Image: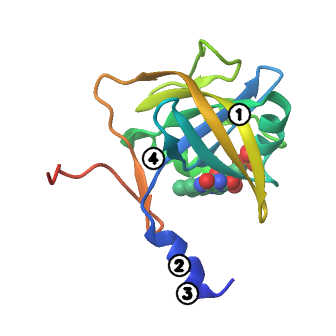
Amino acid sequence: MDKNLLEATRLLPCPVVLLSVGTKGKQDAMTATAMFVAEDVPLLTVSVAKSSTCHKLIEETGEFALNIASAVQVGLAKQLGASHGAKVDKFKKFSIGTEKATQIASPLIAGSSANFECKVITSSAAANYTVYLAQVVAYKAADAPQPLSWYQNKYFGFGKQVK
Ligand SMILES: Cc1cc2nc3c(=O)[nH]c(=O)nc-3n(C[C@H](O)[C@H](O)[C@H](O)COP(=O)(O)O)c2cc1C
C-alpha cells in the first residue's frame, strides 16, 4: 500500500481490545479494536484478519468475548498482537487468567477494564478481513476501569477529562 495511505489508518485513535474465543479444546486470543454501531440493542463491529486463528474459531463458534484492555494489560496486548495461536496455546504461554462467561462458551480475560460477551449477527468480507457485526449479550466492568487506546502505533491510557 502507498506509505502515506497506510499512515492515515494510524491517525484514528482506537480502543484496544483483547478478543478471546473458543473453548478448552481450542481457544485463542488476539489484540484487536472495535467500535459500537448501535446502542439499543448494543451492536458492535470487529474486523478480523482471515489468516488469524481467532478468525477460524469465530467462524466455528459464532461468538467471541471482547475484553476491553486496561492500561496494566499493555504488555499482554503487545504479546497477543504479535503471536499466532495456530501452534501455541497463548493462554498457557502468557499465563492469562480467565473467568467464565455467562452467555457464551468463550473465556473472559481477567483483569480487563470491561468484558463484553458477543454473539455474531452478520459478517461481510473486506479485503483480507471479515467484518463481524455482533450483539453484546452480557457484560461486566471493573470497579475502576482504565481503558487502553492505540494511536500512531503507540499505546495510551486515558488522559484528563476535557469537558
Ligand atoms: C493494537 C493492535 C490492534 C490490532 N487490531 C487488529 C484488528 O482489529 N484486527 C485484526 O485482524 N488484527 C489486529 N491486530 C493484529 C492481531 O492481534 C495479530 O495478527 C494476532 O497475531 C492474531 O492472532 P491469532 O492468529 O492467534 O488469532 C492488532 C494488533 C495490535 C497490536
Task: Classify mark 1: residues with Cα within 10 Å, few (<14), some (14-19) or many (20+).
Answer: some
Task: Classify mark 3: residues with Cα within 10 Å, few (<14), some (14-19) or many (20+).
Answer: few
Picture disc at residue 4: 3
**Amino acid, disc 2:** Glu
**Amino acid, disc 3:** Asn
List x then y, in percent, for residue 146.
Answer: 33, 38
Q: Nearer the viewer, mark 2 or mark 1?
A: 1
Q: Is mark 3 within 8 Å of ligand 1?
A: no
Measured in 3D between alpha carbons, the distance from the residue under mark 1 to the one under mark 3, in whole angstroms, is 33 Å
**Amino acid, disc 4:** Val
Q: Nearer the viewer, mark 4 or mark 3?
A: 3
- Residue located beneath label 4 in the image: 74
Q: Nearer the viewer, mark 2 or mark 4?
A: 2
- Label 4 sits on a secondary structure element that is helix
- Residue located beneath label 1 in the image: 120
Task: Classify mark 4: residues with Cα within 10 Å, few (<14), some (14-19) or many (20+).
Answer: some
Measured in 3D between alpha carbons, the distance from the residue under mark 2 to the one under mark 4, in whole angstroms, is 22 Å
Q: Earlier in the sequence, mark 2 or mark 1?
A: 2
Q: Are marks 1 and 4 in contact (CB under 8 Å)?
A: no
Measured in 3D between alpha carbons, the distance from the residue under mark 4 to the one under mark 3, in whole angstroms, is 27 Å
Measured in 3D between alpha carbons, the distance from the residue under mark 2 to the one under mark 1, in whole angstroms, is 30 Å
Q: Are marks 3 and 2 in contact (CB under 8 Å)?
A: yes
